[in-house]
């Protein structure tokens, strides 16, 4: 088998090979060459071993991964894939072989290995499944159930809806489909941008994969073969957003110790001494054995940390444990891949082979994790708008709260059929709002982004692929309305605060980086959030429970108030809080401070595994509820750690008129020519052209023989 590697002017890899297996191996190899450090970080994160070279800051994640049994789940899912779909399993192995082939050379290029003393390891056949699971285990936001439980317990059930909003730990996206009747070419266009934590290297890899079976361009997840989320095969294209479905459950467990065998049989006690095993109380009233063992997390520069791993018939225990801490409940997590041993990898090859919308639809029938809204279109005018994934059928309480494992009625009873959406007036919009996935979720994103995208699309009778950047970069902030209404009603302000209030009332509500008014609005908003969070009415929520640190973003009061501010300001009554007085104080505070422009404080803050690398990151336009969703945490920081992890425009009239961009570049190697060369485009809303014409690409190496272990 042979494979060839080409690059375009942006350093993006274009691969072609004699068959799909050789292509997968070539994809694994080039990913290892370009992103060895990223791959090894993700492999260790999926195994819960990242603290061994990243230090104490990584212990919280490693502890969660061990307790949730992600690596073991990945192994089980791969073993099941070998049984159910040996072709896909073999294709995954080929990718892993390519990673292992290129990893040593890639590590020599990446300075982080020398800096940490990390030696590149060996990928196993199930490692891509672990990487996928690690990247998406928190996508359904099950920790929100912990928050709701605390709100109900400390304030009351009526307060839950006040805080219902797209929380600080979730990830969303924009996406829109425009049919041929609404485009200049008469063929559909699909465009959008996934919103995730911005990482360096980026979470998406631009790539082109070609063999006799298929020729596909799109955004891959480094460490996973194929192109799952966003792709164009030439005749059909697709894209996804987070459906905001609820498909993970938390169970409150009762455990007891089983003491050694005595003359009258085993003794059972809930005491702490001398046990050989543990049991959990099931809903039928029977006590059944649970699995328990202890693992050790190695910590660079610190002492090893022991982690108790417990699994009940519901699932792994992620809070508390057999050796309980006083005041901490034992809570288990039930998530579909652990139950079904299926991560949906059987969708990946059929997606690459898709020629029309019907092929994409059938492929997504195999999708499992995470649950997504899918849009697709083909060159014949076919369109698709559906939800894909696996959501269990169970009682309503499971979806909103922690339920008692020992009570009947909380079991899973099969799976929801995935709903389909509609295309209205030639347009379909997905932005994590309550749409076709409504029956499957609890909390959805505010409607602002979706409504604004549709409004913008309705402003023109015809659209081209090149026009779509105007939508990507829209900065109108509709969610400012409740605070602006409070401002308009104020009186008795100081001269300075009156001037600020009047200035803001004339503001166009656009969060552009060069806007002083946007900065002033953010300052007032932050001051309101801090005052609300400090109010005695919410004092009971100020101190989060002693849950593991990985769940803290969902449990911290200040971010919760910041993201729910619109609800809190619009509520008819709010526990007697004088909101007008709080807003008045906030305006006075902001008026007393020197103000710059929004981009002075609203700056890019990407996550890097090593904090030692430093860049002067740019100021940004946009905000959490803008189409240009560059999220802040109001009241805490204006820095943006989450935003468009890529932008894409798929043109079904001509694939080479398609466009894309990522926040940094194709290479994960600091200092390389293509490490940050797309950042200027990303900042300005420009996109790079998609090029699939091999004559316009540069071959990086001669045709090489790909060693196939299956041929030896």
Image (spheres, rainbow, N blue to C red):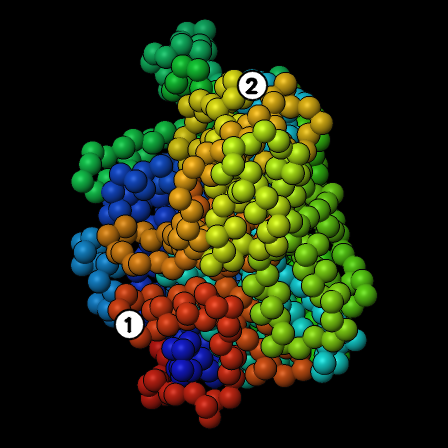
Residue at the (62%, 50%) spot, across then down: 506
The percent position of residue 86, horizontal first and vertical second, equals 53, 63
| Quarter of the picture holding the N terminus | bottom left
Is 229 drawn above or below residue 70 in the view shown?
Answer: below
Residue at the (35%, 77%) spot, across then down: 707
Q: Nearer the viewer, residue 512 or 54?
A: 512
- Residue 453, located in which quarter of the rendered image? bottom right
Q: Is residue 536 left or right of residue 439?
A: left
Mark positioned earlier in the residue sequence (1 or 2) = 2
Residue at mark 1: 672
Is 330 drawn above or below residue 388 in the view shown?
Answer: above
Q: Nearer the viewer, residue 275 or 175?
A: 175
Q: Residues within 10 Å of mark 2 (few under 14, many from 20)?
A: some
The percent position of residue 226, horizontal first and vertical second, equals 51, 68
Kindly report the distance in space between the C-alpha atoms of the residues bearing marks 1 and 2: 53 Å
The percent position of residue 647, horizontal first and vertical second, equals 53, 66
Specify the farthest residue to the top. Answer: 264
Q: Residue 360 got which mark?
A: none
- Residue 580, located in which quarter of the rendered image? top right
The percent position of residue 544, horizontal first and vertical second, equals 45, 24
Residue at mark 2: 537
Q: Nearer the viewer, mark 1 or mark 2?
A: 2
Is residue 50 visible to us here?
yes
Label 2 secondary element: helix
Q: Nearer the viewer, residue 100 or 602?
A: 602
| Quarter of the picture holding the C terminus | bottom left
């Amino acid at each position: 088998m042979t494979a060839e590697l080409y690059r375009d002017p942006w350093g993006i890899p274009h691969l072609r090979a004699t068959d799909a297996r050789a292509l997968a191996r070539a994809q694994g190899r080039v990913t290892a060459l370009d992103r060895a450090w990223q791959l090894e970080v993700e492999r260790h994160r999926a195994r819960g071993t990242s603290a061994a070279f990243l230090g104490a800051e990584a212990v919280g994640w490693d502890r969660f991964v061990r307790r949730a049994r992600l690596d073991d789940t990945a192994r089980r899912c791969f073993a099941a894939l070998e049984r159910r779909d040996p072709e896909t399993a073999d294709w995954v192995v080929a990718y892993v072989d390519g990673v292992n082939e290129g990893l040593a050379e890639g590590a020599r290029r990446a300075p982080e290995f020398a800096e940490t003393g990390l030696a590149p390891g060996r990928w196993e056949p199930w490692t891509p499944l672990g990487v996928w699971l690690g990247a998406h285990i928190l996508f359904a936001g099950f920790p929100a159930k912990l928050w709701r439980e605390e709100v109900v317990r400390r304030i009351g059930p009526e307060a839950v809806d006040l805080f219902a909003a797209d929380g600080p730990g979730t990830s969303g996206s924009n996406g829109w489909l425009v049919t041929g009747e609404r485009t200049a070419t008469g063929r559909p266009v699909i465009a959008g941008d996934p919103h995730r934590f911005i990482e360096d290297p980026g979470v998406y890899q631009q790539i082109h994969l070609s063999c006799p079976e298929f020729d596909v361009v799109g955004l891959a997840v480094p460490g996973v073969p194929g192109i799952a989320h966003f792709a164009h095969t030439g005749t059909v294209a697709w894209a996804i957003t987070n459906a905001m479905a609820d498909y993970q459950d938390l169970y409150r467990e009762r455990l007891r110790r089983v003491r050694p065998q005595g003359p009258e049989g085993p003794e059972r006690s809930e005491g702490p001494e001398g046990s050989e095993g543990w049991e959990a109380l099931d809903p039928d009233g029977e006590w059944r054995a649970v699995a328990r063992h202890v693992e050790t997390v190695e910590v660079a520069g610190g002492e090893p940390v022991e982690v108790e791993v417990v699994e009940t018939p519901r699932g792994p225990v992620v809070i508390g444990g057999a050796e309980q801490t006083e005041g901490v409940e034992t809570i288990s997590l039930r998530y579909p891949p652990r139950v079904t041993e299926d991560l949906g990898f059987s969708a990946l090859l059929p997606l690459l082979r898709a020629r029309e919308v019907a092929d994409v639809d059938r492929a997504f029938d195999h999708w499992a994790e995470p649950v997504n809204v899918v849009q697709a279109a083909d060159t014949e005018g076919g369109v698709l708008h559906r939800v894909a994934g696996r959501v269990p059928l169970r009682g309503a309480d499971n979806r909103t709260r922690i339920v008692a494992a020992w009570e009947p009625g909380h079991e899973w009873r099969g799976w929801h059929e995935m709903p389909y959406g509609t295309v209205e007036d030639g347009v379909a919009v997905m932005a994590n709002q309550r749409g076709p996935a409504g029956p499957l979720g609890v909390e959805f994103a505010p409607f602002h982004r979706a409504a604004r995208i549709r409004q913008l699309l309705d402003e023109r009778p015809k659209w081209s692929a090149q026009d779509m950047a105007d939508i990507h970069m829209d900065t109108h902030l509709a969610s400012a309305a409740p605070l602006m209404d409070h401002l308009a009603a104020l009186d008795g302000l100081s001269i300075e605060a009156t001037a600020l209030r009047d200035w803001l009332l004339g503001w166009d509500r656009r969060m552009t980086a060069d806007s002083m008014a946007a900065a002033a609005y953010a300052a007032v908003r932050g001051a309101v959030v801090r005052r609300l969070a400090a109010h005695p009415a919410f004092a009971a929520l100020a101190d989060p429970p002693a849950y593991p640190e990985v769940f803290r973003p969902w449990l911290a009061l200040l971010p919760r108030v910041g993201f729910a501010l619109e609800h809190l300001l619009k509520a008819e009554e709010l526990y007697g809080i004088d909101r007008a007085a709080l807003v008045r104080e906030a305006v006075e505070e902001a008026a007393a401070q020197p103000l710059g422009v929004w981009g002075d404080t609203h700056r890019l803050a990407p996550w890097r595994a090593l904090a030692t690398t430093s860049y002067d990151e740019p100021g940004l336009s946009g905000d959490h509820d803008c189409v240009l969703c560059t999220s802040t945490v109001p009241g805490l920081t204006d820095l943006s750690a989450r935003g468009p992890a890529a932008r894409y425009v798929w043109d079904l009239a001509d694939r080479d008129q398609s466009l894309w961009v990522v926040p940094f570049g194709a290479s994960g190697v600091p200092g390389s020519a293509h490490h940050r060369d797309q950042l200027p485009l990303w900042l300005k809303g420009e996109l790079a052209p998609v090029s699939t014409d091999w004559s316009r690409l540069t071959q990086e190496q001669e045709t090489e023989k790909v060693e196939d272990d299956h041929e030896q």
